[in-house]
Image (cartoon, rainbow, N blue to C red):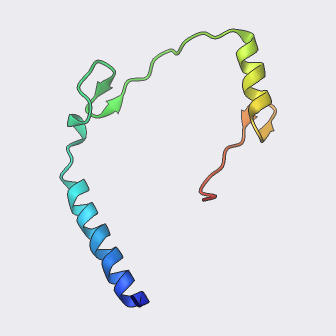
Amino acid sequence: MDSSSVRKEAKKILDNFAISLGKVKVGSLKKDNSFNNGMRKEGKGKKVDDSFRKVFFENAPQKDENCIIGEKKKW
């Protein structure tokens, strides 16, 4: 299989996926109280004990004071 046939097959797969994705209705994804038109309602969050924050930051591979530095498109 040469590279041009691989590219054609990949394009065909992506085009079919884009067509299928275009048919999805965002509001129909989830029908419960936490979603509105496909978007999640933000809440106040749960209160956690102080030890959680300490453990959370200890487990983070990269951090900067009060922020965890996350990987972005490294894959």
25 and 15: which one is in front? Answer: 15
Provide residue 24's location: percent of width, then percent of height. 21, 48
Looking at the image, residue 51 sits to the left or right of residue 7; the answer is right
Provide residue 18's location: percent of width, then percent of height. 27, 62
Provide residue 9's location: percent of width, then percent of height. 31, 78
Tell me what residue is drawn at x 20 percent, y 43 percent.
25
Disc tally is 0
Tell me what residue is drawn at x 74 percent, y 11 percent.
50
Q: Which quadrant holds residue 55?
A: top right
Looking at the image, residue 23 sits to the left or right of residue 33; the answer is left
Residue 66 appears in the figure: no
Q: Can you say whether 11 is above or below 26 in the image?
A: below
Q: Which quadrant holds residue 63?
A: top right
Q: Which quadrant holds residue 4?
A: bottom left
Q: Quadrant of the N terminus?
A: bottom left
71 and 64: which one is in front? Answer: 71
